[in-house]
Amino acid sequence: MPFYLFQGRYTSDAIKAMITKPQDREVAARSMIEAMGGKLHHMFFCFGHDDVVALIEAPDDETAAGCTMIVGASGAMSGGATTKLLTSAQAQAAMKKAGAGVAKYTPATG
């Protein structure tokens, strides 16, 4: 199954709710992802631009997008992004394909 990196920012209301009533958001995320046929490998709260990052495995892009839509529709996030990840083997296969097609590409010139 493909891997995806989710990065998200909670709304101020969601952060206030977690301060008022501390809760394990990983349990909620895992339940939803598993119900959609995926697997939550890791979820971390973090400093910086994002509040949370998660490594997710899903059967396909549509499932990953559906998970993202559920989280987005909840109103708990003020923004985020989902990035499809490639294994090293997949990246090497892409490199081989690029090597086979590179001779057919003409870069833009000024």
Image (cartoon, rainbow, N blue to C red):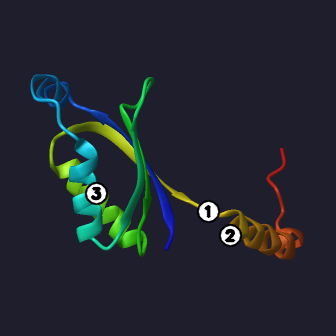
Vertical arrangement, residue 4 with respect to residue 49, above or below: below
Q: CA distance from mark 2 to mark 1?
A: 6 Å
Q: Secondary structure at mark 3?
A: helix
Circle 2 residue:
90
Circle 3 residue:
30
User: In the drawing, what numbered circle is on residue 86?
Assistant: 1
Vertical arrangement, residue 66 with respect to residue 5, above or below: below
Q: CA distance from mark 1 to mark 3?
A: 22 Å
Q: Indicate the amino acid at tag 3.
A: Arg
In the rendered image, residue 10, in percent from the top left (x then y), is placed at: 26, 33
Which residue is painted at 18% across and 39% down in the image? 76
Q: Is residue 85 left or right of residue 74?
A: right
Q: Indicate the amino acid at tag 1.
A: Leu
Q: Is residue 37 left or right of residue 74?
A: right
Q: Secondary structure at mark 2?
A: helix
Q: CA distance from mark 3 to mark 2?
A: 26 Å
Q: Indicate the amino acid at tag 2.
A: Gln
Q: Is residue 8 left or right of residue 107?
A: left
- The quarter holding residue 107 reads bottom right
Q: Which of these two is toward me, 19 or 102?
A: 19
- Label 1 neighbour load within 10 Å: few <14, some 14-19, many 20+: few
User: Who comes first in sequence, dot 3 or dot 2?
Assistant: 3
Asked if labels 1 and 2 touch by Cβ distance under 8 angstroms, the answer is: yes
Image quadrant where one finds the C terminus: top right
- The quarter holding residue 78 reads top left
Which residue is painted at 31% across and 38% down in the image? 79
